[in-house]
Amino acid sequence: MDSVDVVVIGGGPGGYSAALRAAGNGFEVAIVEKEEVGGACLNRGCVPAKAWIAGAEAVDHAALLRQVAETPFEFTPSFQKIVDRERKIVAQFRKSLSALLEKKQVAVIKGEASFVSPDKIAVAGDEISFGHAVIATGTAPARLFGLSKEHALDTDSIFQMPRLPASMLIIGAGVVGCEFACVLARLGVTVTMLEMMPRILPRVDGEVSKTLERELKKLKVEVMCGADIAWVEAGPQEARAVMKNGAEVTAEKVFLSVGREFPTGGLGLANAGVQTRANGSIIIDEQYRTTSPKIFAVGDVAARFLLAYTAYREGAFVADQIAGLSPDRNFGPVPMSIFTIPEIGAVGVTQEEAPEDAKIGSFMFRGLARAHASGEIAGFIKIIADGATDKVLGVHMIGPRATDMIHIAAVAMKAGMTSRNLGDMLFAHPTLAEAVGEAAHDVHGRALHK
């Protein structure tokens, strides 16, 4: 292959969505991917993590089953079976994605791409000219304390664990750290979390953070916030973290959940006139165009959002631009779904970020018949409305199906709805979504069941 209309570097969500849309727009397209199509999300992130979470949720489901079983039983989850199921799911979706790319006549080139010039890349010694390029190389797990990949787990390696350790030290209590804490604790691992910030999930609503910490402590997860770590060491049998005050924490294994890095150094970006920030992320304009006119960057590598689902939209958006179309750049409010147990959903401003005159309503899941019927009563929904206009500014929820129900709020906010509008919607009974309506009514003190 000597030339293509569009070359995409990276086969993750941003890359393959750009390739599929560009092919649909009539272009000859190639993807260059050094590993497997699907990127980190499919192979080492979102998808395998959710398969593990489903396995961990089975522990809670078994508690309900015991209540209704005629014969008492003990449920012992099998880590190996959870892993086998996860790998089967990943392989299935990877196969489906490869078939889709083939169907759309997108060429997949295995290798690492490097720019030779503003309109040419090199892959495994071959040069390919292009009309436009889309960089979608994602990010990599950040490493701290000089820990080796051999002994310190990260999001790339945790799915390759041959067995569950007896204990795990999680460095970082952000989204990923909290999700894995919920899983590992349910599977019998003794979990200790170290977080340098004053609370876990420091970017979410404070009340949501406090509720999840309470649920983690019910699982006997030790949560240490404000941890001032001096150093961490890890070997084949033990990991040890030492605080600056001399306190020590030990575990069999350590899992680093401390953010992401932008490994763009090998892309030859200078040869193409593409500029980066000091951390390696690529500089883009509002249209996702880099400092080189024919080259775009989408997804994590552009550091606008580090989310798979925004990468999907960005890739398709860029492909439509290349085709001369006028796609709508207004994606609307970006919802956040955190797959802890219980789940978390958030969109818009938190209570800490809200204006002083904002009005707030909330409703506990324990007030719903549906929550009691399913045995999932922990958590609440909070709605923040503008004090003057009553427009919904933010919605935060922790509880059953929160990762799905948050989209009710996202639609409401994109439509410019007020809390009264939202509360006046008809919610079926008995459902979990009733809590949205009750919380909206509570903004004005009109919740019926509170």
Image (tube, rainbow, N blue to C red):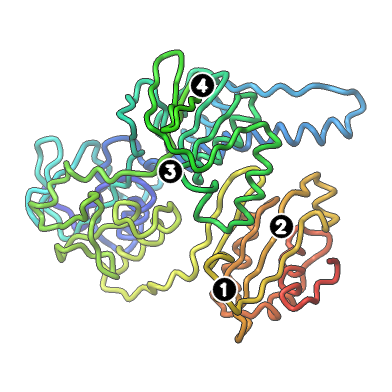
For mark 1, give the secondary structure.
strand
- State the residue position of label 2: 380
| Above or below for 308 versus 256 | below
Mark 3–mark 1 contact, CB under 8 Å? Answer: no
Label 2 vs 3, first from the N-terminus? 3
| Marks 2, 4: nearer the viewer | 4
The quadrant in which the N terminus is found is top left
Label 2 vs 4, first from the N-terminus? 4
- State the residue position of label 1: 393
Please tell me in which quadrant of the rendered image residue 102 appears: top left
The residue shown at (46%, 16%) is 238
Label 3 vs 4, first from the N-terminus? 3
| Marks 3, 1: nearer the viewer | 1
Q: How far apart are marks 2 and 4 (CA)?
A: 34 Å
Q: Distance between the residues labelled 2 and 3?
A: 29 Å
Tell me the amino acid under the disc marked 2: Phe
User: Is 348 or 240 nearer to us in this picture?
Assistant: 240
Label 2 vs 1, first from the N-terminus? 2
- State the residue position of label 3: 41
For mark 2, give the secondary structure.
strand
- State the residue position of label 4: 251
Tell me the amino acid under the disc marked 4: Ala
Mark 1–mark 4 contact, CB under 8 Å? Answer: no
**Does residue 217 appear to the left or right of 250 in the view shown?**
right
| Marks 1, 4: nearer the viewer | 4
Mark 2–mark 1 contact, CB under 8 Å? Answer: no
Q: How far apart are marks 1 and 4 (CA)?
A: 42 Å
The quadrant in which the C terminus is found is bottom right
x, y percent for residue 15: 32, 51
The residue shown at (77%, 64%) is 434
